[in-house]
């Protein structure tokens, strides 16, 4: 009979879901490498499973293919680099290279690799792997992002092997962000990938299909190695038995046995998984903090304020004087005259109630922003930029000075009698931005300016900004942070993301020429104070001339289960900086 | 028989041409392309974007892109996914098992529930089984699948009886094979119900009408007069004849393998083809979209062919071919 089977099966099912035993892992004990790096953090206990979720799917596990942050994050877990950029201190720290020397010419870097480091399959790691990695990156058969980051004006770096544990890299000119860029390059195993390099299939290696079928082929030097990947479900990493770091008592890191990432379809699902106690860590947006905090005691987590995020939000006017192929100007000429007038832009900036935006849109979890970097970028942020506090009277004065006046209809008109009206374009996917645009429209109405809002699909918006230039004003955000070199495409007048007037052949204004000069100068010196001075001036000019009218920056938050010890949360980047040092006294959640 | 099959398969060609052309035109009309998100990142070199554009063929007009794709398809090369850098066929094969599994379980649910219920309902028209199943069937047909899926997720979240979405638990890898099987079964219950319920209702209504029809036939009276038990009459003589029209709908069920589960998979976080295709559409990962459209069309045609063949096999009165 079939009937009695069903209830039994059901009970068994409920049993499975109710008590899943903590997985046991036997750590293979290999001797520590001679060049072991000893962690300075508190000594913990091995074991445990760290669970998080990712709203995006990795598109590849091959660093040469990866263009998105999600894939890059997963690759960074298992592929280590010569040096690390410490996200907490923003300093460069030793990685697979235990130390390095910089020659007096400031162009020659000699890296001394850690002796005794092994790949996760037990094969020794050596200078050959470093050489192989650069060879692969520079090979024209494999177009990749790193090839552009690792060259100056199209010239490649020279890479030489001195001996098995010493590599020398020479840059064609002094290249300021050299260590930071080299720090981002995951080193590839020559013994595993050379056949694919030879037959030209390197970009197809380590794809998602390989990761699913043969995860052990993704060799690791990092703290973890891939154990399994189920598309659209989860990624499981396990402790790399050959990792090169240990704690003060000589116990090999990482402490956690497994790192499980639940793959979910969007950010909401990811936040929900954390709020219901399923995951250990989650980045939270300011509008989610209040309701999530209510579940903190039930699921044993805390919400940490990381301080200002590196994300900037701004409005800008299209200052492109060109015209389309039919001869029609991108911007109506009399409007272009307003947009290129600094006083007009400053008046708009003074007319925006940023404190109101912080209160009304970010629920008080943010702060006004006056320049291109947020305080999150401690190393490069310039606090002494020109500020434009909310002051409608000052706005009106600036507008009057520029020849604008309020007409009998209570609306603002320019000196030729044209009604001041423009359309602000933004993307519809970002609710915070939509709210900010609405508040901006209200602020401008007080000045007699009519703003029409147009919310577009992100693809359409980018098309307008970068290809057709057929718009008046835009509102977007950029993720700042990191080295100033990352901002060249924004600040340089030749830049693709110099949005108010991109791809200029020669700088349109003297201040843009000055910024071009400063951005080029800061790139060609290794001296931090000098670079800081140059970049401070760039930030000052950006705030004086206000081609971008900066709005506010939201704070970033991280939710983390209380059972984890040794936590270091960086202001930028990944949620937890030191995953390998994390440990928990409670092995079951 | 064989000329019939061949004839049916040749109809695939113009249909695939028309459908893929339409999809291609629509995708090229849609704003932005696959590289739009890349263009919006501040630290990507314009030379790399130009290079990618060239390697994807995005710098050419759409008809050239289409011609290129078509040429490759003639060599059975469906292109590769720009997102994953994996051949489309491989990517679809990677995700298909989960979708096929769900389709099979929901089809099984539909048939195992609907067939006995329909026969019992038709045996006593207007009886309590009939009235109850009719009411339930109308109710199930009236609720759209995606809404049912949302309800199921909400129920799972409230009660904790079922996992919220997915096909396996987070600790699936660490379980014994038997527990792994039970884990998957546990995860399959809700999606199967959501996807199968509409099928139960539809099948039930069609089959009930057929059984009623067949019951009027003279050979049934003859069978009863012969002294056969009512059970044998209903399940051997009536059902066998009433099932024929249902066999021809199985083709559509086959075609629904892909399209039917698209909504449900996305609502319920189910790791199948539906999610892959949806994400590919959003990202404008051209070849994955085209590949899945080709698969869906082929399934429709092949499914209909199979059901016609099954009909011929089950009903000696039906013969194809000249």
Image (cartoon, coloured by chain):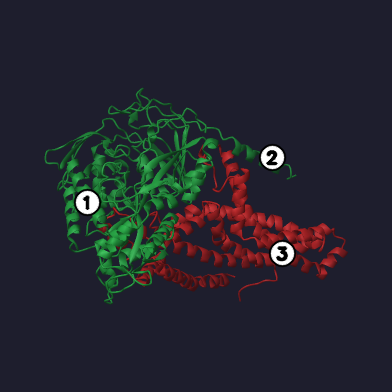
Q: Relative to A324, is B11 on the left or the right?
A: right
Q: Which label lies toward us, 1 or 3? A: 1
- Give the colour of chain A: green
Q: Which mark is residue B205?
A: 3
Q: Secondary structure at mark 2?
A: helix
Residues under numbered marks 1 and 2 in contact, where contact means CB atoms less than 8 Å apart:
no
The residue sitting at the left extreme is A105
The residue sitting at the front extreme is A408
Mark 2: few, some, or many residues within 10 Å (few <14, many ≥20)?
few
Instruction: Identify the residue under disc 2.
Output: A8
Q: Relative to A316, is B95 on the left or the right?
A: right
Q: Secondary structure at mark 3?
A: helix
Q: Which label lies toward us, 1 or 2? A: 1
Instruction: Identify the residue under disc 1.
Output: A538
**Residue at mark 2: chain:** A
Closer-to-camera residue (A232/A217): A232
Distance of label 1 from label 3 (alpha carbons): 73 Å
- Give the colour of chain B: red
């Amino acid at each position: 009979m079939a009937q009695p089977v069903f209830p039994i099966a059901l009970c068994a099912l409920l049993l499975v879901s109710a008590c899943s035993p903590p997985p046991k892992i036997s750590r293979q004990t290999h001797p520590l490498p001679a060049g072991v790096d000893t962690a300075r953090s508190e000594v913990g206990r091995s074991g445990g499973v760290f669970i998080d979720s990712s709203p995006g799917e990795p598109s590849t596990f091959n660093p040469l293919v990866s263009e998105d942050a999600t894939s890059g994050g997963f690759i960074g877990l298992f592929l280590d680099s010569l040096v690390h950029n410490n996200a907490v201190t923003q300093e460069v720290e030793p990685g697979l290279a235990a130390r390095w020397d910089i020659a007096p010419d400031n162009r020659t870097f000699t890296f001394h690799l850690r002796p005794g480091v092994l790949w996760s399959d037990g094969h020794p790691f050596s200078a050959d792997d470093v050489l192989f990695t650069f060879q692969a990156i520079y090979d024209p058969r494999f177009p990749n992002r790193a090839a552009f980051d690792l060259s100056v004006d199209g010239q490649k770096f020279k890479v030489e092997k001195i001996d098995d544990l010493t590599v020398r890299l020479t840059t064609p000119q002094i290249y300021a962000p050299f260590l930071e860029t080299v720090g981002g390059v995951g080193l590839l195993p020559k013994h595993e990938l050379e056949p694919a390099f030879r037959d030209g299939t390197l970009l197809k290696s380590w794809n998602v299909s390989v990761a699913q079928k043969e995860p052990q082929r993704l060799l690791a030097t990092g703290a973890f190695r891939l154990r399994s990947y189920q598309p659209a479900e989860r990624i499981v990493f396990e402790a790399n038995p050959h990792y090169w770091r240990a704690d003060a008592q000589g116990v090999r890191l990482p402490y956690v046995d497994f790192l499980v990432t639940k793959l979910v379809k969007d950010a909401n699902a990811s936040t929900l998984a954390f709020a219901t106690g399923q995951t250990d860590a989650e980045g939270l947006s300011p509008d989610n903090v209040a309701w999530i905090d209510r579940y903190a005691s039930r699921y044993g987590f805390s919400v940490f304020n990381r301080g200002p995020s590196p994300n900037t939000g701004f409005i800008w006017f299209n200052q492109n004087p060109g015209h389309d192929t039919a001869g029609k100007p991108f911007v109506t000429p009399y409007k272009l005259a307003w947009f290129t007038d600094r006083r007009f832009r400053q008046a708009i900036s003074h007319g925006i109630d940023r404190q109101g935006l912080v209160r009304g849109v970010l629920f008080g979890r943010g702060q006004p922003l006056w320049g291109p970097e947020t305080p999150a970028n401690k190393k490069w942020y310039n606090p002494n930029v020109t500020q434009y506090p909310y002051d409608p009277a000052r706005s009106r004065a600036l507008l009057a000075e520029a020849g604008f006046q309020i007409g009998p209809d209570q609306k603002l008109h320019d000196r030729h009698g044209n009604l001041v009206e423009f359309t602000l374009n933004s993307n519809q996917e970002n609710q915070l931005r939509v709210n900010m645009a609405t508040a901006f429209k209200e602020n401008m109405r007080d000045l007699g300016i009519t703003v029409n809002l147009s919310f577009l699909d992100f693809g359409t918006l980018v098309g307008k900004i970068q290809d057709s230039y057929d718009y008046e004003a835009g509102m977007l955000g950029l993720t700042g942070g990191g080295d100033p070199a990352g901002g060249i495409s924004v600040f340089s007048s030749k830049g693709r993301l110099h949005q108010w007037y991109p791809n200029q052949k020669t700088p349109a204004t003297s201040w843009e020429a000055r910024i071009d000069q400063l951005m080029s100068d800061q790139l060609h010196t290794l001296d931090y104070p000098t670079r800081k001075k140059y970049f401070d001036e760039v930030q000052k000019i950006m705030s004086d001339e206000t081609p971008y009218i900066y709005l506010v920056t939201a704070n970033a938050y991280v939710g983390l289960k209380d059972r984890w010890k040794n936590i270091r949360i960086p202001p930028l980047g990944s949620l937890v900086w030191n995953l390998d040092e994390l440990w928990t006294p409670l092995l079951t959640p | 028989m064989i000329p019939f099959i061949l004839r049916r398969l040749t109809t695939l060609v113009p249909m695939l041409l028309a459908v893929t052309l339409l999809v291609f035109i629509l995708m090229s009309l849609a704003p932005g392309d696959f590289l739009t998100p890349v263009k919006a990142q501040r630290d990507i070199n314009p030379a790399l974007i130009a290079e990618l554009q060239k390697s994807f063929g995005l710098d050419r007009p759409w008809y050239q892109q289409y011609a290129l794709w078509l040429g490759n398809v003639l060599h059975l090369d469906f292109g590769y996914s720009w997102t994953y850098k994996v051949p489309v066929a491989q990517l679809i094969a990677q995700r298909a098992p989960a979708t096929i599994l769900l389709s099979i379980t929901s089809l099984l649910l539909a048939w195992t529930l609907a067939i006995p219920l329909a026969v019992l309902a038709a045996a006593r028209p207007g009886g309590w089984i009939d009235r109850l199943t009719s009411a339930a069937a109308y109710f199930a047909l009236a609720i759209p699948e995606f809404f049912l899926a949302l309800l199921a997720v909400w129920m799972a979240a409230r009660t904790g009886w079922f996992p919220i979405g997915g096909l396996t638990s987070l600790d699936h890898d660490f379980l014994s094979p038997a527990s792994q099987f039970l884990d998957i079964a546990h995860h399959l219950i809700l999606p199967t119900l959501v996807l199968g319920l509409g099928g139960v209702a539809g099948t039930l209504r069609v089959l009930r009408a057929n059984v009623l029809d067949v019951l009027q036939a003279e050979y049934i009276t003859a069978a009863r007069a012969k002294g056969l038990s009512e059970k044998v009459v209903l399940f051997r003589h009536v059902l066998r004849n009433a099932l024929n029209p249902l066999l021809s709908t199985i083709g559509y069920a086959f075609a629904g393998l892909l399209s039917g589960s698209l909504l449900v998979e996305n609502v319920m976080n189910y790791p199948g083809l539906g999610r892959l295709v949806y994400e590919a559409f959003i990202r404008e990962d051209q070849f994955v979209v085209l590949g899945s459209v080709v698969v869906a069309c082929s399934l429709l045609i092949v499914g209909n062919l199979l059901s016609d063949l099954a009909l011929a096999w089950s009903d000696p009165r039906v013969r194809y071919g000249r």
